[in-house]
Image (cartoon, coloured by chain):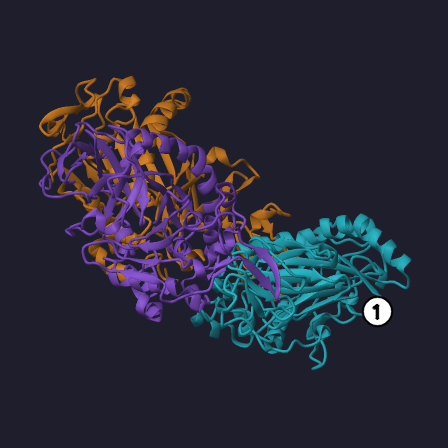
Chain colours: A purple, B cyan, C orange
């Protein structure tokens, strides 16, 4: 690791067309990421977040959320160790009274050195915020980089007016890319073949499917999100698994037709998976694997339902907590979490990425790595986090 | 540490004639090592082992033990995280159903991708096994390296037909070489001078002995184990220890003649010590210091007695548990374990090997390092463990 | 980190005139440091200490304290793991009986190898000791470096005959330089503005003061301690803190005149702060931030009062425990400790020293770094600690 890269420089060329993805061990810069849920930050409160190796401090002021670096520019203490806000619009460092404006980060006062020449001339790093769908999104980017609209960094339909979102988040002990690849992995359904979710919803899950390389789509519209869509061809699915010619395991076949199974999975920049028709036929699943550091990501599974009234939204809120959180998050998704964490043990060394043995049927993973490498707006380096 | 060596390349030349030994921080490859005791793996069960930095998975099938790498070749998850054996002769990865044959490692099926072209063409690493004397030995070696017979890697007499073995194993927090050198260290008896073992068995232990450089033998027979034997000259022993001319400590002199003390100690490749006449006059002590990782070895002390009937074996089994395990392992050998762990604190940096101050009387250690360097069949590198 | 430096070589030139200070991540060699208090080592007892990354073993023999390296020269075990002193003036290693004289470190015997040729020719590292004011000072230095008198390495007045000292010590999880700089930091009083100490002693503390660059003194007398004195101009102090033009916080103004506040603060090599008139008008505060390792220092705050009889000393001893330890150490100084530990999070990477943003008003810190760099007698490297 040098100041320029979390990955040894001599390894980078080996990744070829997915070199930026390979080097983005701690994430892609200049993208929007979910930080936390709106309900997790009340008026006047603060909270911290570690994301892409940077420590941030958030505050909600008159309804609006602001974010700054949680590190005083002077002697680098953590502002969050003792939050001192003497006026509504500012925060003062507890150590020497360096005072920053929440909205633009400008050093507007130094209480202990009121005549300092640097007052008004320096600033602390601020982070653009967008809050929608009950989620606070933060833009982790370079000074002077104009954030693109949020809709460029979320999957299609997520921002639709009638799409109502409920979600959760927790820490997964695996690099964020293992999380993403688990999401777009076409052949990992085998893992879920006995899922309680499928049994309880009377839906079907095949053991795998015979691959069709034409069965996917790459989305690279300049004015929208960049992603790759796996279209799931039902006619290629199969439900009986054989070893040495004998059937040894079976998938679940509890329903028929499109309603009985997810319709498509897709993967979007910066780290976002969408599955239409999951965890039930009338739901859309969105999930983000947000980099925390080299070995950890924050997992944000969210379930979306189209609603036409506040009553329907309230009903879904109840349903999410009582049904989808225990059933889909608690059982099904935690199987994915366990996979990622099991993989992580053998991806600690960066060379692991060249020692894995992808199948022809894993081509979607490679396409995802290449797509991400083409469209990512920057790579996080130790220089940004140090 | 580079991919080629666990030790910084620029240090290697400093070790001169024991360079391979110095670089073998995580052990010598292409050797037989004890993995565990036969009784620790029942029919149909599996168990894992970390050895020389590699993670292995073992299974006993119809009496025979098999071992494979505990890492799927596809996406590098640990097979042991959820063992799935759908047929007697295979194991399937829980993630995508990659199915390997225990006996040769061949990828015989991929349950989720039954038509994959790589089926039958790839394999997972397998490890040759020999089971004898109640011990499962595993050969940690290169693909295509033909294992020599086990008798090349165990001390003489260990495999003798009438030699009955009982033993134990536990983890020691020290590099494996510190364990070996503690075993062959001629002058460390001082440490054991008040051993409860000696008192209870009415045997003698000197404080040290005046060295005789002709009193050892190097064994390099091409068709047998490679080792170095310290012959212990009783006439050079002494039992009174002086500081500034005054006697301050004494060895134990509780018996006379050859029965009252060990007859010889010897050290054998890959990491094996033998002491004839220990822990009692009619026993032979064998011990292995098997590398786990840079800082840890698994210690296998075993006691052998010549028996002529199953009844005698059963009697010794009882005697081992009630007498030698508490007395020899619990008190005497644990003094050695403490020494190794105390040394380890100051051998974390590889330069320590050039900052120690060996005596002329430590020549056996140097002879052992040179012998091991001449005959070891390979050195473990990060490339093997990564 | 190389064998030559705890800091990457390529970073060193960036520190310019304070390069030695920057490289002294684990402290300055060839200086006197407080090790522990006299009362913490009774006659005939031993104790260990980790200081500047080295492990030491101390013993008090006939009233005098001796210190040696806690690592046998032979096989590098820790002597302290089992202390064996067979004669009053020696210690024998528990492993092979290497016996060293406490006073000069000479290897005077090897119990297990009584005829060894190296007896009398090798030595273990010894450390000069000075004991005064109830404190045991140790000189951590190079072989053959003649220690200067202790008075060169303690602040003026500390050794005055009528100065009676009481103190404490504890571990702080921050690099030692952050401790020093917190001590000489002129503008950090803001942190202490609500200190219980000031309220209870009815003394004053300003929020800060308007800086005066002529208001300090550098002391570089060849025959005395090297330091930098901040003279505190009372006429420049202020007690009202403003944000956006409004008063938001106040300092404490509980007393008038010189007795109501500390008179001056100063910083001395190797790592020593002195504050006259703290924690009360008739006391002098001395403190050392002694390097333990890269991330830790041992903090020794000591309070001195001039006394003219044993009765006055005894009275102060009682006062220290009941009043100054809870009030000054427990509340006030622990605010400084928290600052250092908060800073440490963002000074783990050495580049942090070039990313901090010092004010013109921080010139004393820079002057301290330069002074220390001019006069330090050596820099600790991995070669010394390995």
Picture coordinates of residue B92, whole percent (x, y): 58, 60
Q: Is residue A50 left or right of residue C132?
A: left
Quarter the N terminus of chain B occupies = bottom left
Tell me the residue at 41%/50% (across/down). Answer: A258
Q: Is residue C214 left or right of residue C99?
A: left
Quadrant of res C229: top left
Query: A331 above or below A99?
Result: below
Quadrant of res B168: bottom right
Q: Is residue C11 left or right of residue C240?
A: right
Residue that numbered label 1 is attached to: B161
Q: Is residue A200 left or right of residue B310?
A: left
Query: C212 above or below B296?
Result: above
Tell me the residue at 63%/59% (across/down). Answer: B86
Is B75 or B34 nearer to us in this picture?
A: B75
Picture coordinates of residue B373, whole percent (x, y): 59, 75
Is any part of residue B51 visible from this angle? no
Tell me the residue at 32%/49% (across/down). Answer: A53
Is C119 or B321 nearer to us in this picture?
A: B321
Picture coordinates of residue C269, whole percent (x, y): 29, 45
Tell me the residue at 42%/52% (across/down). Answer: A174
Element type at mark 1 = loop
Q: Residues within 10 Å of mark 1 (few under 14, many from 20)?
A: few
Picture coordinates of residue C328, whole percent (x, y): 33, 26
Question: What is the chain letter for disc 1?
Answer: B
């Amino acid at each position: 690791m040098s100041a320029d890269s979390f990955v040894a420089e001599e390894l980078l060329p080996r990744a070829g067309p997915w070199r930026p993805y390979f080097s983005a061990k701690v994430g892609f810069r200049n993208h929007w990421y979910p930080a936390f849920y709106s309900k997790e930050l009340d008026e006047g409160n603060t909270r911290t977040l570690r994301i892409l190796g940077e420590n941030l401090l958030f505050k909600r002021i008159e309804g609006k959320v602001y974010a700054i670096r949680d590190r005083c520019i002077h002697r680098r203490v953590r502002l969050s160790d003792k939050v001192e806000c003497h006026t509504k619009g500012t925060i003062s460092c507890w150590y020497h009274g360096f005072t920053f404006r929440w909205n633009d980060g400008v050093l507007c006062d130094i209480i202990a050195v009121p005549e300092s020449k640097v007052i008004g001339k320096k600033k602390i790093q601020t982070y653009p915020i967008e809050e929608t769908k009950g989620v606070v999104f933060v833009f982790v980017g370079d000074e002077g980089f104009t954030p693109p609209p949020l809709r460029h960094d979320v999957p299609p339909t997520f921002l639709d007016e009638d799409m109502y979102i409920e979600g959760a988040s927790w820490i997964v002990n695996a690099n964020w890319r293992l999380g993403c690849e688990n999401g777009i992995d076409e052949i990992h359904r085998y893992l879920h073949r006995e899922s309680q979710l499928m049994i309880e919803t009377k839906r079907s899950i095949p053991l795998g499917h015979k691959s069709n390389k034409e069965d996917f789509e790459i989305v690279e519209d300049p004015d929208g999100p960049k992603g790759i869509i796996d279209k799931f061809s039902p006619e290629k699915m199969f439900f009986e698994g054989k070893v040495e010619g004998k059937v040894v395991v079976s998938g679940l076949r509890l329903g028929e037709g499109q309603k009985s199974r997810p319709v498509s999975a897709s993967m979007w920049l910066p780290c976002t998976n969408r599955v239409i028709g999951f965890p039930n036929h009338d739901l859309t699943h969105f999930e983000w694997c947000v980099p925390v550091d080299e070995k950890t990501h924050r997992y944000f599974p969210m379930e979306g339902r189209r609603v036409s009234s506040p009553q329907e939204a309230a009903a879904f809120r109840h349903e999410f907590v009582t049904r989808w959180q225990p059933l889909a998050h608690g059982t099904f998704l935690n199987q994915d979490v366990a996979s990622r964490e099991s993989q992580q043990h053998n991806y600690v060394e960066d060379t692991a990425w060249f020692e894995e043995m992808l199948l022809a049927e894993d081509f979607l993973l490679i396409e995802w790595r290449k797509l991400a490498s083409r469209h990512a707006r920057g790579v996080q380096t130790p220089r940004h986090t140090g």
